[in-house]
Amino acid sequence: MKKKVMTALLGLCVLSMHAQKQWTLDDCIGYAIAHNITLQKARLQQQSAQEDVKARKGALLPTLSGSSNQSIGYQPWKDNGIATVTNGQVNTKVNKTSYNGSYGLNAQWTVWNGNRNHNNVRISELTEQQAELSVAEQANSIEERICQLYVQCLYLAEAIKVSQATLETSLKNEQRGQEMVEVGMMSKADLAQLSAQRANDEYNIVEVQSQLANYKLQLRQLLELTAADDFDIATDAPLPWGAAGSGLSTDEQALADIPSLGETYENALASRPEIESKKLSIESANVNLSVAKAGWLPTLSMTGGVQTSTNSLSNNSWGNQMKTNVNMSGGLSLSIPIFDGKQTKTSVAKARIQQQQAQLDLQDQQKQLYQTIEGFWIDATTNQHKFQAATESVASQQASFDLLEEQFNLGLKNIVELMNGKDKLLQAQQSLLQAKYMTLLNMQLLRFYGGSIAP
């Protein structure tokens, strides 16, 4: 009894572990945001931009440096020195070697240079914000790609089920054909056609499974997973659809109202990081123009210093020399540009060109954004209509094939008519799946660009 209980618990654990390996769309996106190498590199660039801001702010502060110089001097032909009296005797010492030391502290501060330093700080802050937006752009790109791959995997997973159901029908028809051959109601040539159809259906399943494996591989690469990591998608999990679509089946979601083109575009203009980045480029170009104009303005600097020195030939002690030789200085320096070979004029002209380029870049980005959203909207609308038509077509083709199959079993229809009917049904089913998942994908991307959900 205990052995049976342990076996059952072990089985539940295995099933639980297997269930944990099923990745939902949200799981894929969350893992990719945390582990994707390209995104991590973008975050490092953002951190580098943050350090640049600190460096530019530090340039506003005064600088202080200390200096010390130690030297030795030698006078080989020196003939006079220091006379001392010891016990009534006069002793003369000639020091040909001397040691010199100098010590100093120097400070410098740029008081004003046409606000160039402050504007450089602002430029670095804008660059940091653009780096942060670049991370968001990269994350959005990865999310969109994951969404496309994931929906494609869902489509192929359901296509495999359709192909498997088609194979089951082919197997039944082949078995029925064998029975009809045995009783003389069908030729072996017709049976061979049924066998070929069954083999073709098996090949189609392998082909679709290969495509599914390829898309899963691309997903794995975006998630930075290795071959040793278990990975499979949760085909039964609903897509994240927002509050309006919670609890709906994929068929119901595909028939839901398509987000408005105009509203989606307006929301995207207010939230997409690529638009915000172009706006920051315009602001940065404006600040760069101010920096260029600062070349025409004077620069005021403040300097100060403290120096002292020592010499071994002095009768004073080292400490007294350090004190008595102290020299303090301070001053103001004013630099007024008069003629710089048109360097400032050229810089200002180029800064104005950069302003115009930044404006055009924003307009171009807005145009591209509208084209992208319009493409999603057109594809969603078109495929939704296709899905509605395909739904009716599948129902009609299914009824027609059921009747053909019944008549074939009674010997009223030949093998060609049966296979044609089966091909039409399969084509209608595949068109239905493709239209449905293309509708889901484009509606999902519209909601993502509109800011209502993450894909």
Image (cartoon, rainbow, N blue to C red):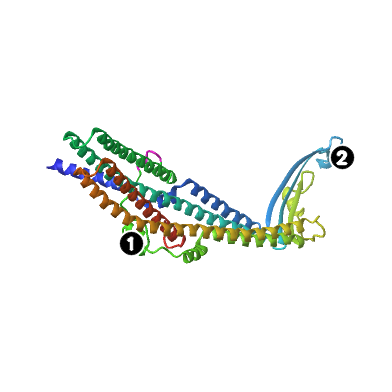
The residue under label 2 is 80
- Is residue 104 one of those drawn in magenta? no
Q: Nearer the viewer, residue 316 or 151?
A: 151
Where residue 308 appears, as percent x and y from the top left, is 75, 52
Q: Nearer the viewer, residue 155 or 341?
A: 155
Percent of width and height locating residue 216 = 39, 44
Extreme residue in the front direction: 412
Q: Quadrant of the N terminus?
A: top left
Residue displayed at 67% across by 59% down:
288
What amino acid type should be assigned to the residue bearing mark 1? Ser
Q: Nearer the viewer, mark 1 or mark 2?
A: 1
The image quarter containing residue 255 is: bottom left
Q: Visible in this render: residue 177?
A: yes
Q: Position of residue 174 (x, y in %)?
A: 23, 38
Residue extent of the magenta highlight: 226-230
Marks 1,2: beta carbons within 8 A: no
The secondary structure making up most of the magenta span is loop
Residue furthest to the left in view is: 1
Q: Nearer the viewer, residue 170 or 433?
A: 170
Relative to residue 165, is residue 267 drawn left or right? Answer: right
Dot label at residue 238:
none
**Against 105, is 419 above or below?**
above
Residue at mark 1 = 246
